[in-house]
Image: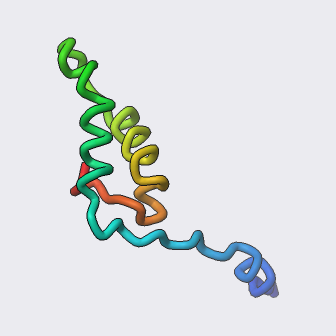
Amino acid sequence: MTHLAPVAQASLPAPIVPLAANPAPAIVAVAEALQPDLAQGLQIDALRLRREMEHAFGGSDATGAWDWKLA
């Protein structure tokens, strides 16, 4: 029989970062970061958008710092 208790205890979930009370400044920062590329007619892919959102919000969507509805 395999006991998984030590494995389960060793892999604790990542801490959840609450969404900002006022996400507007971070959204504006993302828009300003993307604006030069948009002005040139370049496409913004999901990877680039995710990178800018993580930078502006100080965390990832997986940690709860922002969600794709905000993007």
**Quadrant of residue 38 within the rendered picture:** top left
> Outermost residue toward the top?
40
Q: Is residue 9 above or below residue 22?
A: below
The image shows residue 4 at horizontal and vertical percentages of: 75, 83
The image shows residue 27 at horizontal and vertical percentages of: 26, 48
Query: In which quadrant is the N terminus drawn?
Result: bottom right
**57 or 8: nearer the viewer:** 57
**41 or 5: nearer the viewer:** 41
The image shows residue 19 at horizontal and vertical percentages of: 35, 68
Left-right relation of 3 to 57: right
Number of disc labels? 0
Q: Is residue 30 above or below residue 67?
A: above
The image shows residue 62 at horizontal and vertical percentages of: 45, 60
Q: Is residue 9 above or below residue 23?
A: below
Q: Residue at x 24, y 26 (%)?
A: 35
Q: Residue at x 41, y 57 (%)?
A: 61
Left-right relation of 42 to 17: left
Q: Residue at x 34, y 38 (%)?
A: 49
**Quadrant of residue 9 within the rendered picture:** bottom right
State the colouring used for the structure image. Answer: rainbow
**Quadrant of residue 21 within the rendered picture:** bottom left
